[in-house]
Amino acid sequence: EFCLEVMKVEGIVDRILAAIDNRALIDDMSKRGLWLDIITIASCMSVCSPDAMKSFQEVSLHVKLISLLKTFRSSGKMPSMKEEVARCRTMAALFVLIGNLMKGSDATLKECVRSYHVMEEFYAVTRLHPDPLLLTRALDGILIVL
C-alpha cells in the first residue's frame, strides 16, 4: 500500500509512460535492457495498481505497444544472433504487458482484437518463431483472448 501511495506522489506512472515512448531507449541496442526493465515494471504496475492501469488505458498504451510489436516482428533486415535474441525478448515483454492490459479491461481487450488485430501478432509468432519464451508469451496472449 505504501508503494502505491509513493507511485501517486512521485508521478512514477507518467515517468514510466515517457520512458516507454523514448525512441532512444527502444532503438539503441545498448539501452534495450533498460527499456525492457521499464516494460517489466509497467507490467507489474498494471497488475498491482488500479490507478496505473487506468492511466495506461487513458493514454491508449496498448495501441502504442501493438504498433511497436508490429515494428519488431516485421524487421526487414537479417538480424545478428544478439539482435534476434533482443528482438525475441522485446516481443515477449510486449506480449506480457499487452496481455495484462487486456486482462484489466474488456473494452481494451475488444479494441485490441477488433481494431488492432492483436491475434494476428500472436498467431504469426506461433507459426514463425522457435524461441520458447516468445512462443509461451504468444500462447498466453491467445489464452487471454479466448
Image: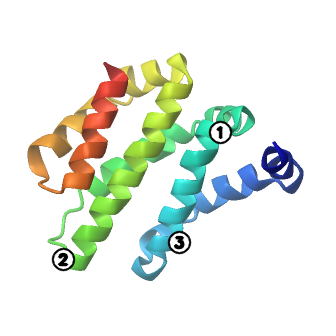
Identify the image's colour scheme: rainbow, by chain, secondary structure or one colour: rainbow
| Kind of residue at badge 1 | Cys
| Kind of residue at badge 3 | Leu
| Kind of residue at badge 2 | Met
In the drawing, does residue 74 fall left or right of residue 97? left
Give the residue at x 10% y 49%: 128
Q: Residue furthest bottom?
A: 30
Whether residue 80 appears in this view of the structure is no
Which corner quadrant holds the C terminus? top left
Q: What secondary structure is marked by label 3?
A: helix
The disc placed on residue 13 is none
The disc placed on residue 48 is 1
Labelled pair 1, 2 in contact (Cβ < 8 Å): no
The disc placed on residue 34 is 3
Which corner quadrant holds the N terminus? top right
The disc placed on residue 81 is 2
Q: Is residue 10 above or below residue 52?
A: below
Q: Is residue 18 above or below residue 4?
A: below
From the image, state whether disc 1 or disc 3 is nearer to you: 1
Mark 2 and mark 3: Cα distance apart in space: 19 Å
| Quadrant in the picture for residue 122 | top left
Q: Upstream in the sequence, badge 1 or badge 2? A: 1
